[in-house]
Amino acid sequence: MKEPTGGQLEILTRAQLDKIHGATVEILGRLGIKVWEKNAFKLFKDAGADADSRTSMVRIPEGLLKETVRLAPSEFYLHGRDPKYKLMMGHKKVHFSIAGQPIYVHDLDGKIRRALLRDAEDFARLGDSCQNIHHVSVGTVPSDVPDDLHAHHVILTNWRNSRKTTEGYNHGIRVAEETVEMASILRGGHEELRKMPTLLGYVNPVSPMQLSKELMEGALVYAAHRQPVLYAPEALAGGTAPVTLAGLLVQQNAEVLAGIMASQLASPGTPVLYGTVSAAMDMRTGAAALGGPEVGLLNIASAQLARYYDIPCRGTGGNTDSKVVDAQAGIETAQNLLMAALAGMNFIYDAAGSLDGSLVLSKEKVVIDDELCGMVTRTLDGVRVNEETLALEEILKAGPAASFLSMPFTMKHLRSEHFIPSLLERRSRESWERDGSKDIAARAREKARRILKEHVPEPMERNLVADIETYIKKITKAHGH
């Protein structure tokens, strides 16, 4: 598995980062943040923050902010169902994920419909097969299982159909504890789970300046078991955040750091990710412009801020506002995916399969985006300059008017130097027409069908499947179903 390295692209100077940090300190010290979850509120209060129980506002002094954020680790591994499969979060390593939790699916027959559990299986198998996709998200919200149990079913489905990493689900204490129990069964105990973090939790602070009750409840459960949580506001410039990107970054920074503090106060050293899902608000429609260039700029700046605090980072790349797999989808996906990767985002969510602002997950687009992730990976590799790659002797040996095609040097370096596509069309027009004049969407549908027919994931141990299925049946009854 290739873990490319980004971080070549920066847009903020150190002085500008200092200014954003300084403004953040003022916001948290003078305004504070509303903390709805009572245990998180108490953690801040006990640590010395100015906590007003009447308003749930917590004002955080600069000293407390610095000493608490410093406890967050600069790196950690997230483990897949196969414990040997692990992703390094940190060191500018870049990983691509399938888009997560849309309620609709763009199926291979071209129809858009409500997601089913079998779609989660399809997406897990597609992700397992795609060599440039590192993480199989909780890809759909299936409509054929109870709402309060959909995460349990999808997580097990992901484990059964992929050896790669997947996330957990921490919307409330109960579901967080249940997903932890599932993962402890997988790992062979709670202590083994602590050693090998397997569930990735999510907290989207409510902009402006709020930490919600349910997500923070689950985040504290995950912290107790040393499972990583990412904090990623969905602030909209001009709507739920200042219209200026610098102003949005200040507010987002305050929201993220407050969340990270809660995790560290609950369990010092617990792994976290500094995240963003922020975008501009389209002032004509009021919708989030998730495919807009502002997303790319916010990703770059957020990655820089994460490194400023020495914390791994999560961004959003690959999102598109297009409703179909068309040129708009390609433009928006490619631009923001490349920008997030060049920024050195450790974990890029929505990198594959997103349509309609990630309300829809497309099977054929997962395959197309896997190809795009491969192109981005090759871009991140850059140009290797050393005595061998300079090819001085090869040029001297060949002389003028020679072909390098038959040289052993070409065969030796071809695959490491050149991106070799499986979907992009490079043949002559005549060859393309003889093969049916298929566009990339048609070729992607064919490839996706072939993967779903032929790809056999590495099987999960039967006893683990049986134990987790038994546990899900038990909690299904406990939930009243």
Image (tube, rainbow, N blue to C red):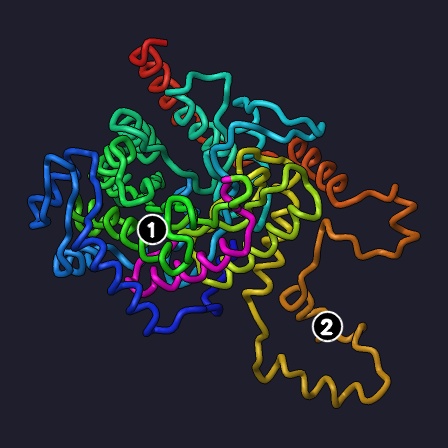
On the question of residue 196 being in view, the answer is no
Q: Do the residues labelled 1 and 2 touch (CB within 8 Å)?
A: no
- Residue 5 is tagged as none
- Closer to viewer: mark 1 or mark 2: 1
Q: Give the range drawn in magenta.
A: 286-313
The residue under label 1 is which amino acid type?
Leu
Find residue 337 and report its image quarter.
bottom right
Inter-mark Cα distance, 1 to 2: 41 Å
Residue drawn at x 33%, y 46% as measured from the top left: 231
Quarter of the picture containing the C terminus is: top left
**Horizontal relation, residue 377 to residue 425: left or right:** left
Counting other residues with Cα less than 10 Å from the Cα at mark 1, is it few (<14), some (14-19), or many (20 or more)?
A: many
- Residue 273 is tagged as 1
Find residue 223 and report its image quarter.
top left
Residue drawn at x 63%, y 35% as measured from the top left: 363
Residue drawn at x 27%, y 53% as measured from the top left: 254
Q: Is mark 2 on a helix, strand or loop?
A: helix
Counting other residues with Cα less than 10 Å from the Cα at mark 2, is it few (<14), some (14-19), or many (20 or more)?
A: few
Toward the viewer: 303 or 196?
A: 303
Residue 132: within the magenta? Answer: no
**Horizontal relation, residue 398 to residue 160: left or right:** right
Whole-percent x and y of residue 202? 35, 40
The residue singled out by tag 2 in the image is: 410
Residue 360 lies, with reference to residue 307, above or below; the image says above
Whole-percent x and y of residue 125? 57, 35
Toward the viewer: 283 or 412?
A: 283
